[in-house]
Amino acid sequence: MPYRAPLADFTFLLDVVGFAEVAATERFAEASPEMVTAILVEAGKLCETTLAPLNRAGDKTPARLENGVVRTSPGFAEGYREIAAGGWIGMGASPEFGGMGLPIAVATCVNDMMGSACLALQLNPLMTQGQIEALEHHASDALKNLYIPKLVSGEWCGTMNLTEPQAGSDVGAVRTRAEDRGDGTYAITGQKIYISWGDNDFSGNVCHLVLARLPDGPEGTKGISLFMVPKLIPDADGNPGQRNSLKVVSLEHKLGLHGSPTAVMQYDAAQGWLVGEPHKGMAAMFTMMNNARLGVGMQGVAVAEAAFQQALGYAMDRKQGKTPLGSGAIIDHADVRRMLAQMKAEVFSARAIGLACAVAIDMGRATGAAEWVARAALLTPIAKAYGTDIGCEVAHLGVQVHGGMGFIEETGAAQFSRDVRVTAIYEGTNGIQAMDLVARKMMDNGEAAYRLFDEVQAAAELARPTHPDLAGAVWTATEALREATEALNAMPPNDRFAGAVPYLRAFARVLGSHFHLKAALSDPARLPLAQFAIKRLLPEYAPLLAQVREGSAGLYALTPEALSA
């Protein structure tokens, strides 16, 4: 079944998550319903006609390293050029540098469609978008004026270089060195791994943001600085000049996402420029990472959408014996219908949470209000972790719907499962997202969370007259989540971490059900899906929150010896 851009879902969900507030601000006043619809329609055409046909090519003919040059999958160069020509890379970038200045919520919808069509290629502009944002917030005017217009236009691409062999989640263990050359530039030496789109054969330059440590940098994250290190050093006119002393050592052989080259990068006294203040690199990098975390969460949603569409098409076409409704198609079977309903309900919930996060980001930027900034921060780890978990789970269900054919590569169902798996790992594993939620995001003693709970319960009260059973279930689950949050905030850190993942999932279950209830109120046709989500999925919150209250003692009772027995 060919990919169809779910334009009606985007339009409907933007309304459900409150995008009208964004369009009412002075900053985003041009984002009228007509303008947003026109943008989504054009992006949908690009995804359906140009990008979706590339997805299988990327899987079957992976990127490869040939004589030091990365050769990309068939059609990727042409696909990338169409993305760039449409201005889609600079959707959220400032018009000062040639960007569209669109709300993040609209850009998120476009990236969602691109990820459904061809995740391996979509990852390239996503990295560049994050780099643009980091430069806008932290770079000098000279660096901004040189790099951002070319990144926005797609003439150059951007990457993010954090991880090293000994420094994965522990970014403070970075050993890459930076030495002052005395001329305003720095010599960058070290090795970085897992660099998505570390090189390509279709852009004029590849610009690497690299974390490195100055000689006087203290140990840990407080001693790390950020540098712009281009593949080709710009000349006096800003054009790509001589080759910098960096190279792709190798490309990783991966479970999936074969069309996206994942590089090991070597820097040998490569010329770089400081971005931001010395020893303040993590603040600049977190700007890029937070952008990427929402983007990666929506990658999970994107693959889930594509996997659902294909599974639905297969279930409607596949004939197999007698069925309860008499059509002979497997979609008539109760268990197949259950799987498809779960896939659709999960996609709706995860997409709604991601778009609500994007709306909060937009409102924070447009108004500067601390409450919106806090809302965006709170929702980011939920959007990333839940979105990518759902991507993995829905892709898994898609294989199951296909039965034996799901295990056969020719259907493409298995590719969704392989491609999406990394999204739960990169840009901070989902366990780290959950730990961030129960630690850093609760440093306000849960104030941002409690405000959100109040809104969810108020919305449930509005729904009681027409949907008392659904409204009551959402209200009760939210109250249980509130009480669990209070208990969580009273725990020592390691006890919080022991229950962080089930807490985040319970939080997402409540939020997803909240948006399903709002959808049912707005459109009666959405009621059956809301009933499925609230009656069959929401009840998971109770055992999840029971785990939160258990703390860490039971985990450590399982000693390495006990686990090895």
Image (spheres, rainbow, N blue to C red):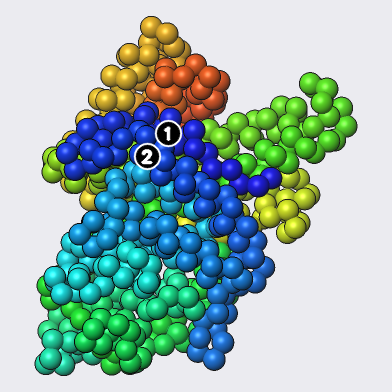
**Circles 1 and 2: CB distance less than 8 Å?**
yes
User: Percent from the top left, x then y, of residue 6?
Assistant: 52, 39
From the image, which quarter does the C terminus lie in? Answer: bottom right
Query: Residue under circle 1?
Result: 11
Say what amino acid the circle numbered 2 marks.
Val
Q: Is residue 533 left or right of residue 94?
A: right
Residue 446: % across, % down: 21, 38
Q: Name the residue under label 2.
A: 36
Residue at point 13%, 43% (across, down) = 368
Which is more foreground, mark 1 or mark 2?
2
Q: Which secondary structure, mark 1?
A: helix
Residue 225 in percent (x, y) is at: 19, 75
Above/below status of 447 relative to 71: above
Local crowd size for mark 1, using a 10 Å CA cut-off: few (<14), some (14–19), many (≥20): some
SS at mark 2 in the image: helix
Q: What residue type is labelled 1?
A: Thr
Residue at (44% x, 70% y) in the render: 196
Tell me the CA gap for discs 1 and 2: 8 Å
Does residue 103 sit above or below 430 in this rendering? above
The answer, for residue 318, to whether it is visible in the render is yes
